[in-house]
Image: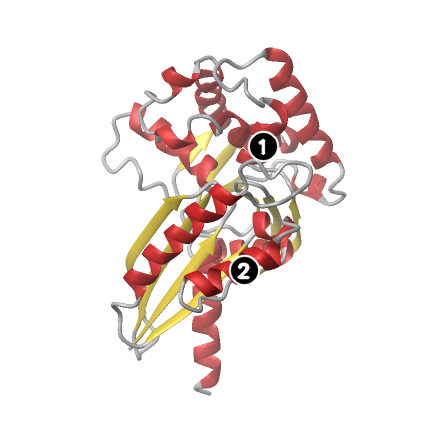
Amino acid sequence: METLAVIDLGSNSARMTMTEIHDDGSYKVIQRVKRMVRLSQAMGEEETLKQPAMDRTIQALKEFQEIYRQQDDITLRAVGTAAIRMAKNQAEFLQRVKDEVDGLEIEVISGSMEAHYDYLGVINTLPATNCVIMDTGGASCELILVQNGKAQNLISIPIGAVNLSEKFFKNRTDVFRAEDLFWETTFVNRLFNGVWWLHKGQNLPVVALGGSNRTLAKIFRKQSDMINFEDIHGYRMSVEQVEQVYAEIISKNLEERKKIPGLSKDRADIIAGGITPIVTILRYLDSDRITFSQNGVREGILFEHLTELQESEK
């Protein structure tokens, strides 16, 4: 038996999933851990990781290491995404991680690879034969057009909950202004217009993942008094339900948003920026529904690993 630990170091959160892989090829998730690190916070136009964000992230990685080292026969894969990809001081941060987290090496994956892993995580766990997959993170958004079960096109664009909020709301996240929301939506829509193949997804359902999108489902499920409201994998919402939650979020000030059931307080300042892309793409594609996925990059890496194990046994 092998234990695979996958660390996904994102722009807003650091997450780790540990999975037991049995000799017969079956597997079981034994632990999931998340820390909100806000790594991309205040990167600005100079695109540099700031000291407080790096310190928070390294502390989270140290905590992860204490956990996975308790396992025998551990296989570790640690990947970094948008914030590290774009950081001018990437090499400095990766060296700090290696020095301070006892040799831990972070593999910085491309946006296309991140989208590919999202596809693997979704397609292996949901009936997603024809759809558009959307993963909205802290500083990037991955889009995948799936036709007949295959990823026909994919792209990563540099927008997410953190950088959109900083760009359009700056210090005004307490109360949203109509003009800021308008310019954010316009900006996102223009980016979608620039993705030449995205129109092929017209009228297809959207499969959504990423912290902000999942929060959308959690808020609605909590308001509907659903048991296990955080269990959103495979859950569906109509466009009208999505817009209802979005309208509620942008109508409230920061303190009121912190009290919304299903919305964690540490996401309240970036949730509007993070949900705008999904609201915009639903209109762009004229989709009638959205399905949520709990599985993305970490699960995609797991399925890639399982395939490699199967092929090595042939």
Q: How is the image coloured?
A: secondary structure
Image check: 232 left or right of 146?
left
Task: Please tell me which of labels 1 and 2 falls first in the chain.
Answer: 2
Q: Quadrant of residue 257?
A: top left
**Residue under the image location 37 percent in, 17 percent down:** 255
Furthest residue in direction bottom, as rendered: 314
Q: Which mark is residue 74?
A: none
Task: Looking at the picture, tell me which residue is in the foreground, 212 or 147.
Answer: 212
Q: Residues within 10 Å of mark 2 (few under 14, many from 20)?
A: some
Q: Residues within 10 Å of mark 1 (few under 14, many from 20)?
A: many
Q: Secondary structure at mark 2?
A: helix
Figure check: 74 above or below 197 = below
Provide residue 106's location: percent of width, then percent of height. 51, 62
Distance of mark 1 from mark 2, alpha carbons?
Answer: 30 Å
The image shows a total of numbered marks equal to 2
Q: Secondary structure at mark 1?
A: helix
Figure check: 158 above or below 125 = above
Figure check: 215 above or below 223 = below
**Residue under the image location 46 percent in, 40 percent down:** 291
Query: Which amino acid is tagged 2?
Result: Leu
Q: Which mark is residue 94?
A: 2
Q: Quadrant of residue 231?
A: top left
Q: Which mark is residue 277?
A: 1
